[in-house]
Image: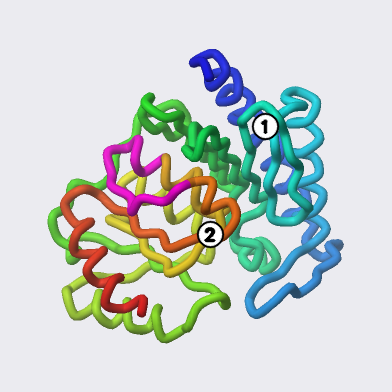
Amino acid sequence: MSNNEIQSRLDFAKKLVEEAGKKALSFFHNINELEIQKKSIQDFVSNADIEVETFIREQLFKTFPNDGIVGEEHENSDGNSGYTWVIDPIDGTTNFLTEIPSWCVVLACVHESETKLGAVFEPCHNELFWCAKGTGAFLNDVPINVSTSDSLSNGSTGVGMNSRTSSQMTVSFIQKLIERGGIFYRNASGALMLSYVASGRLVGYAEPHMNAWDCLAGQLLIKEAGGIIEFQDANKMLVEGGRVIASGPNVFDEILEIANKAYI
């Protein structure tokens, strides 16, 4: 692995998520024409998700044909370069389908069990969050940093949930958070909420289980923005997903303590 290999993929990823985001935005502006299927409770997919992911895969294959690809809506593609791309074509599909402008296109790249770069594009407000390992995190080319708050009562904490885990876990987490003076925030896009942690808009984030395509980019963004994330092996996350705890440095231990008591 060389710095040039990472830089070329980062430059490409930034352009690609913006192009894919614009494509998704055209579907968003014609929402009544979409074909929608329900995968599970509060989990939907439309032809917009499928077509945007297909577009991303085609562009990746043209430019980096030996890289692997893992995505939410298609079968995985193996590669032999050691690099694996992780795609969520539309994170926040429920928002997307109900015309709530809070969704994003997510792209990350993994090498040797580590996430090396991430890009999250929110087309409705033209916000591109991006980073590479060791370079810092950025929003539209402006450096960003996590919150330096030393109290959960000084900001909102993002809380994720899904049908794969018990709802009682989330109820317990929220209750314990409120008891400590915190406020919970949820916008139904885990990747976007993680990006908000990286940019200091949220003090932290917790979810008992996330899939790799929802969290790898956001976790690296937070780390590069000066935050702390609960360690996860990226290759293991590609297969199984896992728990995600992340925040600014001064409240991480407290959020982790709440999660350890709630997520049982």
Residue 226 in the magenta stretch? The answer is: yes
Residue 252 place in picture, x, y as percent: 23, 56
**Which residue position is annotated with label 1?**
16
Q: Residue at x 29, y 53 (%)?
A: 247
Q: Earlier in the sequence, mark 1 or mark 2?
A: 1
Q: Quadrant of residue 211?
A: bottom right
216 or 12: which is nearer to us? 216
Quadrant of the image containing the C terminus: bottom left
Residue 89 place in picture, x, y as percent: 68, 49
205 or 103: which is nearer to us? 205
Outermost residue toward the left in this view:
150
Residue 13 in the magenta stretch? The answer is: no
57 displayed left or right of 108: right
Badge 2 amino acid? Gly
263 or 239: which is nearer to us? 239
Q: Secondary structure under badge 1?
A: helix
Q: Secondary structure under badge 2?
A: loop
Badge 1 amino acid? Leu
Q: Are marks 1 and 2 in contact (CB under 8 Å)?
A: no
Q: Quadrant of residue 119?
A: top right
The label on residue 241 is 2
| Magenta extent | 221-233
Instruction: Establish if 230 lies above or below 254.
Output: above
167 displayed left or right of 74: left
The label on residue 90 is none
Residue 165 place in picture, x, y as percent: 50, 77
Instruction: Establish if 87 lies above or below 181.
Output: above
Q: Quadrant of residue 30?
A: bottom right
